Every structure is written in structure tokens, then in C-alpha cells.
Image (spheres, rainbow, N blue to C red):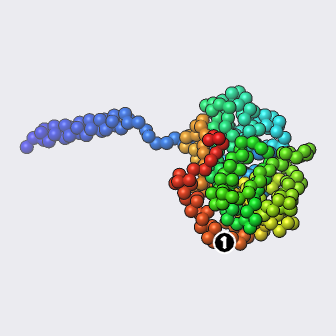
Amino acid sequence: MSNRPTNSYLIVYLLIIVLIAILLGSCSSSQPDNRQIELSTSEIVFGLVTAIGGFGDRSYNDLLFNGLVALKAKHNIDFVVRELHQETEGLHLVQELIHQGANYLFAAGGYYMVEPIDQLARKHPEVFFIILNSDPIEYLPNVASISFNKNDGSFLVGALAALETQTNVIAMIGGQEHPSQKEFFLGFQAGAKYINPQIKIFEKYVSYYESDLHPFLNPTIAYEIASNLYNYEQVDLIFAVALASNLGVFNAARNYRQRAIGCGADQDHLIPGSILTSLIIRMDNVIIKILDEIIQQRITNKKYVFGLDGEWIQLSPMHYSKINPGHLEVVESLKKRIIEKKIIVPNLEEK
């Protein structure tokens, strides 16, 4: 019997397989590749210019540093830092970091860093700049900002202070009267008056008093302000929002056997029993979040806003405080209502 039909069928069969393979390959190559292209961490060098005062403030700057150290340990990301001690140093410090190879640069000095970043971002399009706690002059293609709903967090602080006070007189001491600090007071005042509309609230700033030291680096003046409030104004609880100057408020609280509230990091342990709680601005967590945006190449020129809905702004665990459990339940309920937009906390933009 002849094999020709069988060979013919085999040839046709093979041609069909080849044709199908070609068609499938063609279809596959014509489809877009939707896989996210990630940036290697070896291509990232973080730069940080601290807020006024530098490291060792047991507050905001130390949390920033902790975040960078965590990134170094987990992802082996290099970072370079400079400490800001004078308001006019910003431009020079950022230039130094750029020369050291920083290509993602955090400027934590807030409003002191706005003009230097605007100038250098135009000159260095290869560097991405991120301003903390202030808006840039312009959101250039390589400029973003990080903002916290500080007023929401300080609303909870004010509510707790109003619940805990025995004299119905409380206060806030800031470093310098500026929009970033006023946001703290607006929330603090709103939270306190939400609990007790008749409560008396003092608003003081270290910058009101003449001194050679920067208002965020002057615990001596902060101590004097707090002492006068405790001793002469019947204040029994002070919210300290002045970076390193907070230590003066805490010492006054201990000496006058009153209480204070910290801000920035968890400061409760500095003088156990004298610090009711702390409003923690979790810059360490935010740095990790921003790193993810950078790696996934989603970072863009916009304002990144962080609030109570996540591990961004929170009250300390209050391990050293004796607080009425019912008061904590009230505060937790208020937090939930703020997140759900059932309570709208006032801010400067509405003023």
C-alpha cells in the first residue's frame, strides 16, 4: 500500500501547527505589556534636610531619621542628611546633598525651604524634591509636597484636654506663629470647645519673647511661658508644639505638678506621668509610603495628604498616664466621626 496520502496529511498537519504558532506569536507580541516597571532601589539615593534644630529633638526630626534608617536596613537604600539650624541655610544644604548624589530629596524645614526648593528644582530637573509641611511656590514636574491633617489630630488632643482638665483652663505653646502652627491651634481649640464650649484656652508662641535662640530651640523661654500659665492663669494642661522647646514645657509641668501634651514623636517617656499623651506625626511611616511610590514610579508633582485614616497621625499609647477609660472611648468615637466626615474640623483654608 502506498504511504503518499499519509505523508501528505502529515505535511499539512505540520503546516497547520506552524501557522497557528505564528498567529499566536503575532497576537502575543501585539498585546501591550501591562506589567509595572519598577525602579531598582540601587538607583535611589535619599537626601534629607531636617526641620530647624536637627537630630536629637526627640520629636519630628528623630522620626524622620528613624524612617531613613529603617529603609537602609530593609532595602539597602543610601541616604545623606544635613541638619538645618538657621533659617537661611536651606539653599546651601540642599546643594550639598545634590552634589553628594541625592536624587530624591526631602526638605523638612517647611516654609523655610519653599524658596530654595523652587530655585533648585528649576536648576536640577534630574532631582525630585519633596517639601514637608508647606506647599511649594509651584508644583514643577519634579516637585511634590507632603502635608498632614494636623488640625484633625489636634482636635482629638483638644477634646482629651477638655475631658481631663480640672480647672477648665488649658493652653497651647507653639514655636512660631505661622500657618503650619496655627493649624494645630485651630484643631486644638475646636476639639476642646466641642467638649466644653465654655472652656478657656490660651495661645502662646515662643517667638513672642525676645531671645538670641531660635523659637523652636529655646526650652528656657518655653519653660517661662508654661510656668506663668500654670502658676498665674490656672492652666493645668498645655499642648506643646515647639519641637525642641517642648522640653521646657515638660519640665514646667513636672515642677508645678501639672500635665502637658507632646507633639511630633511619642514624648510620653521623657517625663513619665507629667505628659498626658503625644500627638505623633508618623514621618517614619510616610517615608516608607513615599518609597513605594518611587519604586513603582508613581511619584508625581502633587500634594500628598495624610490624616487619621491610617498609621499617619495618632495619639500615643499613654502608658504612663492615668486616664478615665470613658474619656478614651469619647476620643476614639470622635476619631471615627472625623474619618467618616461626620465632623469637619476647621482649617486655615476656610478662614
Residue 115 lies in quadrant? top right
Q: Residue at x 82, y 39 (%)?
A: 87
Number of dots carrying numbers:
1
- Viewer-proximal residue among 20 and 84: 84
Figure quadrant of the C terminus: top right
Q: Could you tell whether 224 is left or right of 290 in the image? A: right
Picture coordinates of residue 7 (x, y %)?
17, 39
Figure quadrant of the N terminus: top left
Picture coordinates of residue 197 (x, y %)?
66, 57
Residue 176 lies in quadrant? top right
Q: Helix, strand or loop at disc 1?
A: loop
Few, some or many C-alpha atoms within 10 Å of disc 1 (few <14, some 14-19, many ≥20)? Answer: few
- Please, which residue is most extreme toward the top here? 123
- Please, which residue is most extreme toward the right here? 212
- Viewer-proximal residue among 73 and 315: 315
Picture coordinates of residue 103 (x, y %)?
68, 38
Residue 38 lies in quadrant? top right
Q: Residue at x 63, y 32 (%)?
A: 139
- Please, which residue is most extreme toward the left here? 1
Q: Could you tell whether 296 is left or right of 276 in the image? A: left
Q: Residue at x 67, y 65 (%)?
A: 163
Residue picked out by circle 1: 324
- Viewer-proximal residue among 232 and 350: 232
Q: Could you tell whether 127 is left or right of 344 in the image? A: right
Q: Could you tell whether 7 is left or right of 64 in the image? A: left
The reply to whether residue 245 is visible in this rendering is yes
Q: Residue at x 27, y 38 (%)?
A: 20
The reply to whether residue 81 is visible in this rendering is no
Above/below status of 262 relative to 319: above
